[in-house]
Amino acid sequence: MSTTALVLAAGNGTRMKSQKPKVMHELLGVPMLHLVIKSAKEAGADRIIVVTGHQNELVDECACQIEGVETVYQDDRIGTANAVELAKPLIGDDDEGTLVVLAGDVPLLRPETIRSLIDDCVTHGAAMSVLTAIYENPFGYGRIVRDETDHLEAIVEDKDATPDQLEIKETNAGAYAFAIDGLFDALSRIENNNVKHEYYLTDIVKIFKETGKRVRALPVADNDETMGINDRSQLAKVTKILHKRITHEWMDKGVTIISPDTTWIGPDVSIAQDVEIWPNSYLRGQTSVGKGSTIGPDTRLVDSTVGEQSVVDSSIVLESEIGDFVNIGPRTYIRPGCVFETGSKAGTSCELKKAHVGPGSKVPHLAYVGDTTIGKKSNLGAGVITCNYDGFVKSKTVIGDGVFVGSDVMLVAPVTIGDGANIAAGSVISTDIPADAMAIERADLRVEEGMAKFIREMKEQA
Ligand code: UD1
Ligand code: CA
């Protein structure tokens, strides 16, 4: 028996006041649409179909970044019932299956909640189960009307509700499980004689009831999961809930987070036991941190891996690999494509880009290293710069094993420094240096005795 998830994402998202489609706005670095799709997948959906409409090219592209996702286009946004009906050609006659309908702007629903909704519908042989939430201020939501025996009788939209119905605090969370058998027949009978002249999916309750089918309303365990995003304030509010959920999950798994309020961890990040995260740190994208490492304070890791027992202090690391026992920072900028092998180091105050730093090698102070490979146990002094760009092309610097590069050296690429070589401080190196050689490039030093005093006295007389 198969489960298909249908994610409704055709709406205009007017209240976001944005050039970007609403469902592409990000929570902790992930588009809200991806969060919904991932939850549906984890809940066990075999197929995921996204209904797109407003700015559909962009939303299609975003949806299809997740493998296997299909999309269907809704030209006229004439209501949620129509949005579901449009998926009929894709779903076909899967009369055994279940269809889960979710809203693209409700990103906090947990996979377990979606699963329990599917199970509720299937185990009770219901035509439909709808998820409900209790809100003290239910303004704007569809209300759940129950009969004397507490069974679901109808869902009434806010704008169509009677004063009595407006008092109801149980609301439609906008997530449903349907038996596919009979669903499209019922949908085709929904009309738009309501205040908004839309085809409301919620009207399907009445139609099922008329035909003697079972409909169920399942209260959610945690109301926060059902919060929708319509404007930027709600985006911030929902982000904050996700943020809290994620930091607490990692603390439960044995990660020390000194200041959960100021630590922002993306949903796809993974963190091993006994990692310590100091305040004002951001871990985003496909990032992982190995056992016993310390991150922060004031650090940003994006799409990067950090091994075990490493330290990244007050630094930014983008799309790079940091091995075990590595020390980065303070105040170091690791740009994409860097690899740090075991026991290597970069910082204080360095910038590295596409740099491979071999085991035990160190770039300890104020250096720029780009398009460079460094072998093992080499040391670059303060202020070393690899001049990788001549204004036309980028060139590579290769530094061997056990090399010593003195302070303030310019390595003008393309250039290779052989194993064991020693480059004297202040040199500009523009040819290859053989292994074990010493290279000194300096103008002759001129010392003119008494000249400084002479100039000073001349100025005083003037
Ligand atoms: C809907 C429910 C309401 C529920 C609320 C929960 C209906 C009629 N009402 O109201 O009972 O309490 O969600 O958040 O369903 N969409 C389409 N095509 C359309 C219309 C909407 O894809 O033609 C999408 C929207 O992009 C959105 C979702 O469906 O993702 C819900 O539509 P929206 O207009 O936001 O409905 P609500 O008024 O919030
Ligand atoms: Ca909505």
Image (cartoon, rainbow, N blue to C red):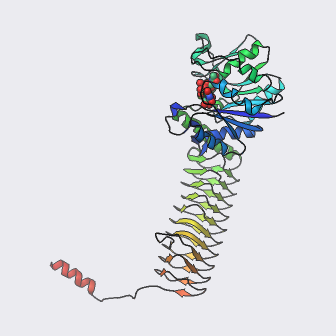
Q: Does any portion of residue 227 appear in the rendered image?
A: no
Q: Residue at x 63, y 66 (%)?
A: 340
Q: Residue at x 71, y 21 (%)?
A: 187
Q: Position of residue 254 (x, y in %)?
A: 70, 49
Q: Does any portion of residue 276 appear in the rendered image?
A: yes
Where on the picture, by quarter, is residue 395? bottom right
Q: Position of residue 437 (x, y in %)?
A: 57, 87
Residue 44 left/right relative to 164? right
Question: Is residue 154 depicted above or below 180 in this figure?
Answer: above
Residue 41 left/right relative to 366? right
Where on the picture, by quarter, is residue 274? bottom right
Q: Quarter of the image for the N terminus: give it.
A: top right
Q: Quarter of the image for the C terminus: give it.
A: bottom left
Question: Is residue 264 depicted above or below 343 in this figure?
Answer: above
Question: Is residue 197 depicted above or below 340 in this figure?
Answer: above
Q: Position of residue 65 (x, y in %)?
A: 66, 46
Q: Whereabouts is ligand 2, in terms of quadrant?
A: top right
The residue at the far left in this view is: 462
Report the front residue among 209 and 374. 209
Q: Residue at x 67, y 22 (%)?
A: 201
Q: Position of residue 47 (x, y in %)?
A: 75, 38
Residue 411 left/right relative to 173? left
